Amino acid sequence: MSAASYPGQPLVEVRGLSTCFGSEGTGLTGLFKPEVPALRAVDDVDLVVMPGQIVGLVGESGSGKTTLGRTILGLEKPAGGDVRFAGRSLVGLGSGELRLLRRRMQMIPQDSAASLSPRMNVSQLLGEVYDIRRTPKDKRRSAAELLSMVELGSEHANKYPHELSGGQAKRVSIARALAMEPDFIVADEPTSGLDVSAVAAIINLLMRLRSQLRISYLFITHDLDAVAYMADVIAVMYLGKIVEAGPAEQLAEAPRHPYTQSLMNAVSRPGEERRPWLAIRGDIPSPRFPPSGCRFHTRCPFAQPLCREQEPKQEESGPGHRTACHFWREIASGSHLIQ
Ligand code: SF4
């Protein structure tokens, strides 16, 4: 389903969002250590999620994906910008109002097994969500109902986390997120650490829940096959910035940004030859010391002197498609110069 298939108002709208983590070496420590700049993990990000839409968020570790997801949910304090949920700004809301809206926005944590208390059985873990949110007994879904929603039998209710497989622990995490009947879920690497068959089963479960309950997801992942299969829109993050975003099919088949191109080389296309896009070199730099100009210039095979000096702005590079690269037209048409 393309982005154009989602008319109406955004469910989640992020504008100019930034998240910083404190500078080291300030205060008393700063007398003895040179000051280190704050880490800008998310830097001036715009993102829109429409009702029922799956937005895939991809990029290497250290690109700021999880911090962006946590900031949208109010789990990290933004340093600037705005997050609107169902038309209401979350920034500056009182704690009571924020708590009510937060019920409709849930997270599936990356490490499901570690996020489940080893001292509670599954039934207690599901009830805990309602206890934390002080949900009246008559408004609670039963453990059996929640387990059935994630395709687990009621016999799992008495099991403890160490008795669950990786896929089953992930399903319990999903059931905990579903308990509050959310409209929006940040799914943080929901398939990481699972074997191939469990990955397929979790993806199909999330897709079915989206269709049945019209849940929107921000799907944070390294799994490019999964994101190409299930996302409606893909956003690509590099060192705190969204460098390209657009309809999933376009991004997978005709990426404009060299970073997206290198990532999309990894998408498997049965029966097709590998895409000819150039691989990137080196490791991602420290987000505490991002390169000048285009942050990708230290690894980009197409970098020109301008790239070191001037940060590229996002430009419309197709219908619903935006790219932050000075030379995306030349790169897309093959008339670029490789240095
Ligand atoms: Fe590469 Fe320059 Fe484009 Fe950045 S702006 S991605 S360095 S060509």
Image (tube, grey):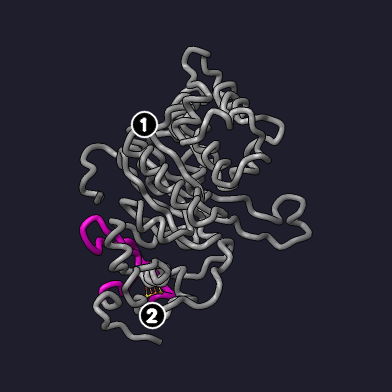
- Above or below 298: residue 58: above
Q: Residues within 10 Å of mark 1 (few under 14, many from 20)?
A: some
Residue 133: x, y in percent?
54, 23
Residue 293 placement, left or right of 38: left
The part of the image, by quadrant, that contains residue 272 is: bottom left
Identify which amino acid the numbered label 2 is placed on. Phe
Task: Say if residue 36 shows up in the picture.
Answer: yes
Q: Is mark 1 within 8 Å of ligand 1?
A: no
Residues at badges 1 and 2 in contact (C-beta under 8 Å)? no
Give the structural element (helix, strand or loop) at label 2. loop
Question: Would residue 93 be seen by someone viewing this image from the given angle?
Answer: no
Counting the numbered discs, the total is 2
Q: Quadrant of residue 257?
A: bottom left
| Residue 196 x %, y % | 49, 57
> Between marks 1 and 2, how big is the CA–CA gap?
41 Å
Q: Is mark 2 within 8 Å of ligand 1?
A: yes
The residue closer to the viewer here, 86 or 207, is 207
Say what amino acid the circle numbered 1 marks: Arg
- Identify the residue at horizontal 21%, vertical 41% (top origin): 7
Give the numbered dot on residue 148.
none
Q: Position of residue 226 (x, y in %)?
A: 41, 56
Q: Position of residue 317 (x, y in %)?
A: 25, 64
* Residue on which the image places disc 1: 88
Q: Nearer the viewer, residue 105 or 97?
A: 105
Q: Quadrant of the C terminus?
A: bottom left
- Marker disc for residue 302: 2
Q: Residues within 10 Å of mark 2 (few under 14, many from 20)?
A: some
Question: Mark 1 or mark 2: which comes first in sequence?
Answer: 1
Residues 129 and 18: in front is 129
As drawn, which residue projects farthest toward the right?
32
Vertical arrangement, residue 267 with respect to residue 82, above or below: below
State the extent of the magenta-drawn residues as a range.
Answer: 302-329
